[in-house]
Amino acid sequence: MKYGISPLYQVMEQIECYILEKGLKSHDKFPGERRLCEEFDCNRVTLRNAFECLENAGKTYSIRGMGNYVAEQKIEICLTGYDSFYQHLMKLGQNPSLEILSVKKEEVSQKIAKQLSVIPGSSVWETKTIVLLNDIPVVFETNWICAEEHPKIVREDLEKKEIYEVYRAQYHKDLEYGSEMIGITSAQTEEAEYLEVNDNAPLFFIQKIGSTQETPVIYSQAVVRPDKIQFVSVLK
């Protein structure tokens, strides 16, 4: 063991190096505890604690009576820029699919009116969509756009394409400005059903406002599976 570093963190580091050196892929199984203890020069308690920490970080998982496995690698999404989750994944070279759950025109609520800077009582389009990766739902998103300020946007288009794509196609503009807030929430019944997770499972909660020339256009709320996607930021 090296001095100056906790045995637990050293073994965690060794496990991660082992994954890279052996070229292990998602769902590959690790050797047994005895072999790994010899490999890392540690005891079983430290090894088990290291795997528990890595499992909590989403890097490994265990099956009772079977052993430890490499977890599926999470997709990293950068928080800079204003793209939809679908667009983010496309740019990362993934092959996402989009399921449009519902499209409706309704009177805007006071909360949504404030986010879009429109008069209470205005009409808005609301869309609910799911983004899937390899047929696994990863994002459940609800979007709003003022119908009265964007008359070119119609139901027929929203039922075929995501709201961001419809807006760009009809108005030939990109969303140039935006604000974003990220937090943690628990899956409600509807969210759990669509994302195929347990009720009260932890999820990322994202709120975004996309604007042009500082005028709000689209307000979005999304819940994201943390076992499939993680967020990073770029400091400049």
Image: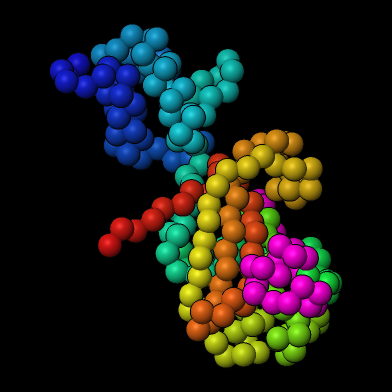
Q: Is residue 171 above or below residue 47?
A: below
Residue 173 magenta-highlighted: no
Q: Is residue 185 left or right of residue 108?
A: left
Q: Is residue 157 above or below residue 102?
A: below
The image quarter in which residue 7 lies = top left
Image point 65% across, 89% down: which residue?
170
Q: Nearer the viewer, residue 169 or 213?
A: 213
Image point 62% across, 90% down: which residue?
171
Q: Is residue 210 above or below residue 79?
A: below
Image point 75% across, 81% down: which residue?
147
Q: How many marks?
A: 0
Q: Is residue 33 left or right of residue 62?
A: left
State the quadrant of the N terminus.
Answer: top left
State the quadrant of the C terminus.
Answer: bottom left
Which range is magenta? 109-138
Rendered location of residue 88, percent (x, y): 51, 65
Image point 46% across, 52% down: which residue?
231
Q: How is the image coloured?
A: rainbow
Q: Nearer the viewer, residue 72 or 125?
A: 125
The image quarter in which residue 203 lies = top right
Rendered location of residue 222, percent (x, y): 64, 56
Q: Is residue 53 visible?
A: yes
Q: Is residue 93 visible?
A: no
Q: Nearer the viewer, residue 44 or 67?
A: 44
Rendered location of residue 131, percent (x, y): 65, 60
Residue 114 magenta-highlighted: yes
Q: Is residue 21 left or right of residue 164?
A: left
Rendered location of residue 92, percent (x, y): 46, 64
